Amino acid sequence: KMEAPMKYIWVLGFLVSLGIAGFNWVDGAGECGKSSPDSEAFKLAPCASAAQDEKAAVSNSCCLQVNKLAQKPSCLCAVMLSNTAKTFGVKPEVAITIPKRCNLADRPVGYKCGVYTLP
């Protein structure tokens, strides 16, 4: 049932990542270092359902990726608000709750992420 749409999403994601790799050569360091927030967003694929539904379970693989990004809150924020995240249906108001739902002790509580604040 879900296999066809998921396959489509992964193919689309792959094509988007190719586009990002081909057209987004970044020399400097942005919010996520030399990587763009859009390319970092693909690492959060395990968080897809948790970023759309606040009641969805958050997987260990999602929490591991979020923990890595949370070390640089500006990157985590940029990823959550990225075009790639929007394309995949991420709801920023739900996505910002993931670090808390993962029980990350060193999460950036109170960090301003656009109009959102990390709980």
Image: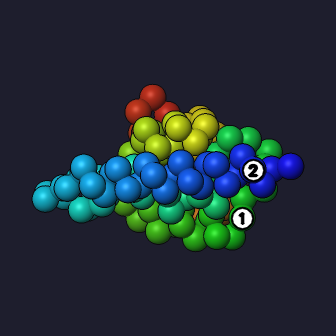
Residue 108 at x, y percent in the picture? 47, 55
Q: Quadrant of the C terminus?
A: top right
Using the image, determine if residue 75 lies above or below residue 116: below
- Residue drawn where x is 44% and y is 62% of the image: 69
Q: CA distance from mark 1 to mark 2?
A: 22 Å
Residue 98 at x, y percent in the picture? 62, 52
Residue 44 at x, y percent in the picture? 55, 58
Q: Residue 32 vs residue 106: left or right?
A: left
Amino acid at circle 1: Ser
Query: Can you identify the residue that label 2 sits on?
Result: 4
Task: Tell me the mark number nearer the camera, choosing from 1 and 2.
Answer: 2
Query: Can you identify the residue that label 1 sits on?
Result: 59
- Toward the viewer: 80 or 24? 24
Q: Quadrant of residue 45?
A: bottom right
Amino acid at circle 2: Ala
Q: Quadrant of residue 65?
A: bottom right
Is residue 106 shown to the viewer in this render?
Answer: no
- Residue drawn where x is 70% and y is 52% of the image: 6
Q: Which mark is residue 90?
A: none
Q: Residue 24 vs residue 99: left or right?
A: left
